[in-house]
Amino acid sequence: MTKSILKATFLIFTITVLFGVFGLIFGYLFLSNTEIDWNFPSDLIDKKSFITVGTMHNFSYVGGFVGMIIGMIYQIRQKKAIV
């Protein structure tokens, strides 16, 4: 059981990191060069970097959710394989 939990945790972590990296790349290549209607701080110096990091942050939340679902499916399949 511990081995299965550790594998599922590693799977969730890996998926979250991959989504975050994808969000970083997506934000840098596509969103940072467009006009986005976000609520920016008034003293913001580097808008392009702010958009890039904000996109990475948002994508990592999605990755955590997707990873959680996949981790739960993995755990259920492991349980059914034992029974």
Image (cartoon, rainbow, N blue to C red):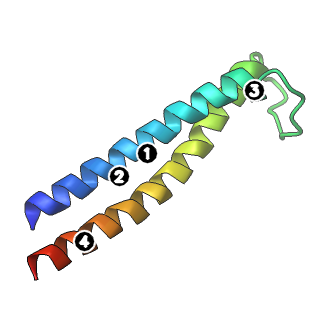
C-alpha gap between disc 1 and disc 3: 21 Å
Q: Earlier in the sequence, mark 3 or mark 2?
A: 2
Q: Position of residue 65 (x, y in %)?
A: 49, 59
Badge 4: how crowded within 10 Å, few (<14), some, or many (20+)?
few
**Quadrant holding the C terminus:** bottom left
**Quadrant holding the N terminus:** bottom left
Question: Is disc 4 placed on a helix, strand or loop?
Answer: helix
The residue at which mark 1 appears reads as: 16
Badge 1: how crowded within 10 Å, few (<14), some, or many (20+)?
many
Instruction: Determine whether, in the image, residue 63 is placed left or right of residue 74.
Output: right
Question: Is disc 1 placed on a helix, strand or loop?
Answer: helix
Instruction: Determine whether, in the image, residue 59 is placed left or right of residue 80.
Output: right
Q: Residue at x 48, y 57 (%)?
A: 66
C-alpha gap between disc 1 and disc 2: 6 Å
Residue 79 in which image quadrant: bottom left
Badge 3: how crowded within 10 Å, few (<14), some, or many (20+)?
few
Q: Which mark is residue 30?
A: 3
Indicate which label's residue lies in the foreground, 2 or 4.
4
C-alpha gap between disc 2 and disc 4: 15 Å
Q: Residue at x 68, y 22 (%)?
A: 28
Q: Which mark is residue 12?
A: 2
Residues at badges 1 and 2 in contact (C-beta under 8 Å)?
yes
Which amino acid, by three-letter code, is at mark 3? Phe
The residue at which mark 4 appears reads as: 77
Indicate which label's residue lies in the foreground, 4 or 1.
4
Q: Position of residue 20 (x, y in %)?
A: 51, 37
Instruction: Determine whether, in the image, residue 47 is placed left or right of residue 24.
Output: right
Q: Earlier in the sequence, mark 2 or mark 4?
A: 2
- Given residues 26 and 43, the one toward you in this image is 26
